[in-house]
Amino acid sequence: MRDETGHPGVGRVLVVIPTYNEADNLTWIVSRVRQAVPSVDILVADDNSPDGTGAVAEELAGQDRRVHVLHREGKQGLGAAYLAGFGWARRRGYDAVVEMDADGSHAPEDLPAMLTAAQDADVVIGSRWTSGARVLNWPLRRLLLSRCGNLYARLALGMPVSDATGGYRVYRLSALDALDLESVCSQGYSFQVELSRLAHRAGVRIVEVPITFAERERGRSKMSPLIVAEALWRITGWAVADRRLALRRGIHSTPTGQVRWP
């Protein structure tokens, strides 16, 4: 029978791993998750990968009752995959969901610390830019892009989050229920920023845990100039909208420039 007790202090946890052409990485990353945190379940949300990732996922699910597969019709984007995973978890009574990349950049070995932090938080961000974190094998250009992008998001949106674009996260389902997920329409970096913004505005408890982030060793990165441009465009739009709303409601900014919501 399935162990319903879940992870201590958190409950039943589902790790959602979106995939598109990750056949070379999937078995490896699933094995690491199962070793790092045996109490969690895994959902592979595959966007009909032409390289056979879905078939690999089905094979893993056939071998391990804690591995599940969500086959999607085509490549619909990271944000849509996670939203589908959130819905899958909600319908099956999970207490928390984890966002994790399939390429190994999010070390499963960091997940126990993140779940421990989730005992006293609603959202846990595995942060690349908080004290104690490490980023491995990134060229200076990528480091500067991420640092500057996160600084811009923090200042523009008034969020006390160092790594708003980070995609390694734990969400309690109760926190997701407090967010207006039906309004989410962005992908990639901007999807993570949008959920950070919604969580901050909803007043849920957000904490950051330092992680070791490593560039993928196998397969091709999904990052593109278009994804970066979308993030900058959407962050600017949200910042303008927030300030207009603050003016209409008579909400004042703090001395640090952050918008104080009621």
Image (cartoon, rainbow, N blue to C red):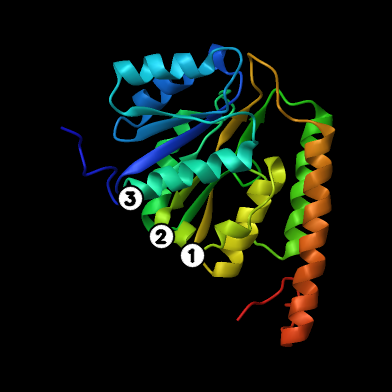
Extreme residue toward the bottom, this view: 250
Q: Are marks 1 and 2 in contact (CB under 8 Å)?
A: yes
Residue 141, position in %: x, y? 84, 31
The secondary element bearing badge 2 is classed as: helix
Q: Nearer the viewer, mark 3 or mark 1?
A: 1
CA separation, marks 1 and 2? 7 Å
- Identify the residue at image location x=39%, y=39%: 14
Residue 33, position in %: x, y? 41, 27
Could you say which disc has been placed on residue 105 in the image? none
Of the 4 image quadrants, the one containing the C terminus is bottom right
The secondary element bearing badge 1 is classed as: loop
| Residue on which the image places disc 2 | 174
| Residue on which the image places disc 3 | 10
Hey, what amino acid is under mark 3? Val
**Pointer 2: residues within 10 angstroms few (<14), some, or many (20+)?**
few
The answer to whether residue 243 is left or right of residue 90 is: right
The secondary element bearing badge 3 is classed as: loop
| Residue on which the image places disc 1 | 178
Name the one closer to the observer, 198 or 147.
198
